[in-house]
């Protein structure tokens, strides 16, 4: 996938073998007893590419490493290993001073619009703040950019919202303000971390439609979500994560209509069907997600996999094209396929 994106020159973001671990403090007693240092294996060898004008959805249950991956890509967290290329430049080890100029081109929308907005700031100040931090434009030019960003985010006419505080806005309006604050710098990449999980169903479609429209204007969007139905409707490609690894990836159509990995099949089995007459039996996975401190040997999904065989306990599979896949870009990490 990365090689194909690089060949046509359209990849704005490339991630190769990304690794992120969180060390666990041993405490005084643990240090004195010389207990081994433990780490949470949050992200283990994740690779993907994001093209301009494309929406890539990272899908998986809570704790699988989606948000850690997104924050590390933006260098909000430091990677332990791997390479992050932005527009062809390796930014994995760039110092904060050199990263500052790149921050304008990489923005994030946080999950909770009730926590991501400062309650002391009016909408005008919230959206204008990125321009002030980067010292862009005169006061009049910044005012014009704030109007443009609010209108682009669906708050039109902007004058109705400029002087409001967050508590005077609905949940959907707050999320649109957060989107406007991310768009005011005209970024090349937008990371949307569960952008609609805190919103009512009636509001979600409007926010997702805004993101889809921005993608059509050339913005690369990395969307973090646990909702496969949302990813299937709006994303161009889907990467399914489990316990720090991507276990299946491909176009949204291939992953949803021809899932190859048992974990993807289980996620899709519990998605409500549009036709009430279409009945399916949900695949309820046994047990809980393994402790990310002690990763299972072999395939990390085998303790919960309904089709696991003895070899699954020994072999750690790599992403490869399954025999039943219809596209060379469709890959899954399972020895049974």
Image: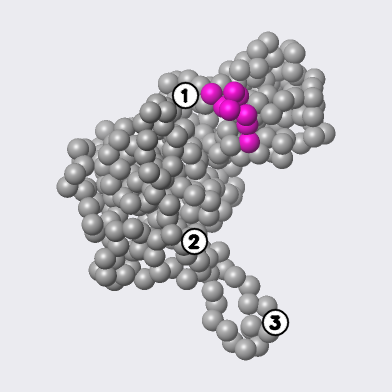
Q: In the depicted view, which residue is nearer to us: 183 or 100?
A: 183
Q: In the depicted view, which residue is nearer to us: 258 or 333?
A: 258
Residue 87 falls within the magenta-colored stretch: no
Answer few, some or many: residues within 10 Å of disc 1's Cα (few below 14, many 20 plus, some between 14 and 19): some
Q: Would you name the residue on which mark 2 appears?
A: 288
Q: Nearer the viewer, mark 2 or mark 3?
A: 2
Q: Is residue 124 left or right of residue 185?
A: right
Task: Name the residue rendered at 71%, 40% in the picture.
Answer: 115
Circles 2 and 1, Cβ within 8 Å, touching? The answer is no
Task: Name the residue rendered at 60%, 24% in the picture.
Answer: 203
Query: Image quarter for residue 37?
Result: bottom right
Q: Can residue 22 be seen in the rendering of this structure?
A: yes
- Number of numbered discs present? 3
Task: Name the residue rendered at 69%, 14% in the picture.
Answer: 158
Which badge, 2 or 1, comes first in the chain's sequence?
1
Residue 203 falls within the magenta-colored stretch: yes
Q: In the depicted view, which residue is nearer to us: 200 or 155?
A: 200
Q: Would you name the residue on which mark 3 appears?
A: 28
Which badge, 3 or 1, comes first in the chain's sequence?
3
Specify the segment rendered in magenta: 198-205
Which badge, 2 or 3, comes first in the chain's sequence?
3
């Amino acid at each position: 996938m990365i090689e194909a994106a690089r060949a046509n020159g359209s990849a704005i973001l490339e991630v190769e073998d990304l690794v992120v671990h969180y060390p666990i403090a041993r405490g005084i007693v643990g240090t004195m007893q010389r207990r081994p240092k433990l780490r949470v294996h949050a992200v283990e060898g994740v690779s993907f590419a994001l093209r301009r004008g494309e929406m890539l959805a990272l899908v998986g249950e809570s704790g699988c490493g989606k948000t850690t991956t997104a924050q590390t890509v933006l260098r909000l967290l430091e990677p332990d290993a791997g390479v992050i290329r932005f527009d062809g430049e390796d930014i994995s080890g760039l110092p904060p001073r050199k990263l500052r100029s790149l921050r304008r081109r990489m923005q994030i929308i946080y999950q909770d619009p009730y926590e991501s907005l400062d309650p002391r700031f009016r909408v005008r100040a919230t959206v204008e703040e990125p321009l002030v931090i980067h010292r862009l434009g005169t006061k009049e030019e910044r005012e014009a950019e704030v109007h443009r960003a609010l209108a682009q985010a669906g708050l039109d006419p902007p004058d109705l919202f400029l002087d409001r505080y967050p508590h005077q806005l609905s949940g959907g309006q707050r999320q649109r303000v957060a989107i406007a604050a991310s768009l005011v710098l005209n970024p090349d990449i937008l990371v949307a971390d569960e952008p609609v999980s805190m919103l009512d169903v009636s509001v979600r479609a409007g926010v997702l439609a805004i993101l889809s429209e921005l993608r059509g204007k050339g913005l690369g969007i990395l969307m973090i979500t646990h909702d496969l139905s949302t990813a299937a409707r709006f994303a161009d490609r889907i990467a399914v994560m489990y316990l720090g690894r991507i276990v299946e990836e491909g176009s949204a159509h291939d992953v949803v209509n021809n899932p190859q990995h048992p974990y993807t099949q289980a996620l899709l089995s519990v998605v409500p069907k549009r036709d009430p007459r279409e009945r399916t039996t949900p695949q309820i996975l046994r047990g809980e997600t393994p402790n990310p401190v002690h990763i299972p040997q072999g395939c990390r999904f085998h303790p919960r996999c309904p089709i696991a065989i003895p070899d699954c306990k020994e072999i750690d599979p790599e992403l490869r094209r399954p025999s039943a896949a219809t596209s060379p870009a469709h890959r899954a990490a399972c020895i049974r396929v």
